[in-house]
Image (spheres, helix red, strand yellow):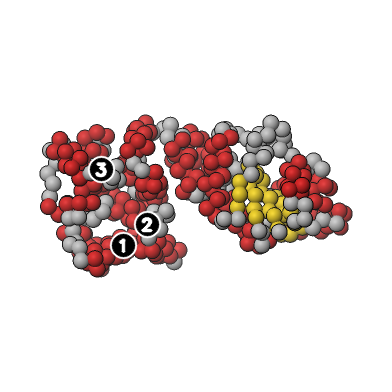
Amino acid sequence: MKIGLYGGTFNPPHRGHEKAACAFLKEIGLDRLFVIPAGIPPHKVVENAPSKEDRLALCRRAFLPLSEKIEIWDGEISSPEISYTYRTVQKFRERFPEDGLFLLVGTDMFLTFEQWREFSYLLSACTLCCAPRTDEREAIFEKKAQLEADFAAQILLLEEKPYIISSSEIREEIVKTHFSFSLSPGVNDWIELTGLYGSGKSDPLRRKILARLKKEVPEERLRHILSVERECYRLTRLLGKEELLPGICHAALLHDLARHSPVERQLEILKKYGVPVQREDLNPPVLLHGVTAAAIAAEEYGLAPIFTDAIRYHTTLRAASTVADRILYLADGIEETRTHAACRKARADFEADLQRGMAPQRAFLRANIRFLEGSIAHEKAKGSTVHPASCGALQDLQKEWEKA
């Protein structure tokens, strides 16, 4: 077999690490890949390090969804000793005596490989692999030739271009925005729900809402809610509507608060707050959760009407919809953890429009129209009654598109 070893501090594991792991698997044709979070790395201090349990949890959420061939090995992170790579390779050589070992290292580490402890043993025990950065390809090729000539080393260079991102920059971003788009959804979720790296400290209301969600909402629904929040943040920044932050993110967190509450309980809440219920809000009953969540957002969390209205109509949209309505409506439909084919296509079409250079405001309007048209067609195909608010919203959006 071909056994891959990929170590690092992974503080936190980001999309660059994930991209490297996928390229390592594919280009080398690995049968198994062991991701190895370092315990005490010899070359640097792990800054603001989470607990061992949190670091392992982050690695599982980053790497395990990528392939069934990937495993997380905790031999280094569980050891009180310095994480010298040669010790790890010795353990794997004993475990897989007849198989090929392939060690993936970063560009900086590759260029200084002769400074590693027992580097000559490493070159004899495994094939060294590296993904060169564009600006250092010449130096990488020179080092490869030198190591092959001096030590008969076996070295493979990956074709995949590295995803360059700084872990320290990600940690700083988390303090400001509670998440990072350089992290996969599962990693972001864990950080947000545990408060790692200072996530949530700057927004007491957000912490209060999250605490309630963790008690009242199923785990799968909570993952969706957090992803909607991130998508709302992205869309808001894309449209240049920063004045809507953080209110639109609070609305995103609350939009599905009542999604799993019995209708009878929701009716009690609405009666308590004096909110009338329209017949169409119960056809089907699942639509009621938007009305209920909007009432809770207004009465218990003090959200402004522009945001409570967005919650109220996040499943249907409405005529004369505001930009906040549209942001939450679209974010709810195309957030990146959605698995339904129509949702994934809507997201892909939106991204394609942006990549082709369409103005963000126009691409956003088109995405809302497409998604609403698809939703209405889906309801009609099921023989369900289309909510009148959706019909009014579509007419408005189409007129706006024609004038744009």
Location of mark 3 (residue): 261
Along the polypeptide, which appears first: circle 3 or circle 2?
3
Mark 3 to mark 1 CA distance (whole Å): 26 Å
Q: Is residue 81 above or below residue 361?
A: above
Q: Is residue 123 left or right of residue 133?
A: right
Residue 56 placement: quadrant: top right
Return the x and y of residue 328 as percentages of the image width and height. 31, 50
SS type, badge 1? helix
Q: Nearer the viewer, mark 3 or mark 2?
A: 3
Which mark is on residue 371? Answer: 1
> Alpha-carbon neighbours of circle 2 within 10 Å: few (<14), some, or many (≥20)?
many
Mark 3 to mark 2 CA distance (whole Å): 24 Å
Which residue is at 70% across, 58% downward? 2
Q: Nearer the viewer, mark 3 or mark 1?
A: 3
Which mark is on residue 207? Answer: none
Which residue is at 46% across, 34% downward? 195
Q: Is residue 191 visible?
A: yes
Amino acid type, residue under disc 2 in the picture: Ile
Q: Is residue 253 above or below residue 319?
A: above
Location of mark 2 (residue): 334
Return the x and y of residue 150 as percentages of the image width and height. 87, 54
Which residue is at 54% across, 42% downward? 58
Along the polypeptide, which appears first: circle 3 or circle 1?
3
Return the x and y of residue 40 as percentages of the image width and height. 68, 35
